[in-house]
Amino acid sequence: MKGRTPAGLRSGAVRKGGDDPIPGHVGAGRLRGRRALVAGGFDRVEGPGRVLAAALAKEGAAVAVAGAANGGAVPAQRTRGRRGPTAGTRPEPGVLAAADLLGGLGAHTLPLHCEPGDETDCRKAVAHTALEFGGIDLLVVCADVPPAAWRMTDLGARELERGLRDSVFGAFWLVQAASLYMLEGSAVVLAATRRGGAEHVGYAAGAAGVMSMARSLAVPMRERGIAINGLLLDGADDPRRTAEAGLELATATSGQDTGEVWSLPGRRRAD
């Protein structure tokens, strides 16, 4: 891995990146030396992207974090350990805060700009992660784009397409690009949050599509020795449960432990 391997990871509150969403989790080095990209889910302190990125970092992984911003380009900034970020294009505040959190935990991290519905952005985020870390072993995609509260009668092709691009299309582009850098023993986790109500129909369709993708890509990914699984959240999950489930899927093998979709709370299989 390019740069130093993260060491001395700890839990608890950190500097200006904000509170640790899983302060009770103490890593055991399960992912030491692994290189991860976590895309999406940084819009709130206990967003799935932030929770899962913190969990990966505490287990020893180098973690790049990517999310949407108003304009900008990749690469953004980077931090190693407790060093401050270098100059560059700034991604969204949630991504910067997450990177600062990971740096405070002692992890090698890289914050990146990535609009989920932009194919070029998705591919660039993957390429810059691989360039910085020397490869990618773990990909976590959080299709957690906040849905617009449209009334059912106002939904048209543009709104539905936007929901699908930001979820299904973005997840596929990230998986497709990352798979080129992944070796046997790598893993992909696709996470999405289910939402009810007719005004969220576009997002709901996207979340269902992402979970279906985890199943449909299992065979071709297994042939390359890569595990791919889905994690369906309900938007009010205990961050500790999210972290535990995400870590278990991140350490899955490409044998029988692939093509599964787990549903929280309760970490049950979603049929």
Image (spheres, rainbow, N blue to C red):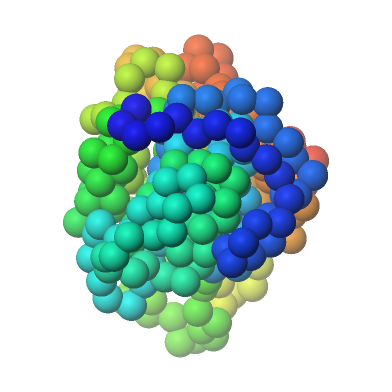
Q: Quadrant of the C terminus?
A: top right
When the figure is inspected, residue 241 is found, relative to residue 6, above or below; the finding is below
Q: Nearer the viewer, residue 247 or 226?
A: 247
Residue at x 71%, y 56% (from the top left corner): 13
Please determine whether, in this image, residue 127 is positioned above or below residue 1. below
Q: Residue furthest left?
A: 120
Q: Quadrant of the N terminus?
A: top left
Give left or right: position of 102 versus 38: right
* Visible residue check, residue 137: yes
Query: Which residue occupies 46% across, 25% down?
Result: 33
Residue 53, horizontal then vertical, whole percent:
55, 46
Q: Nearer the viewer, residue 170 or 37?
A: 37
Q: Residue at x 46, y 64 (%)?
A: 96
Which picture quadrant has residue 184? Answer: top left
- Residue 140's x, y, as percent? 47, 42
61 to the left or right of 91 = right
Q: Where residue 235 sits: x, y (%)?
A: 68, 61
| Residue at x-position 34% and y-position 34% | 3
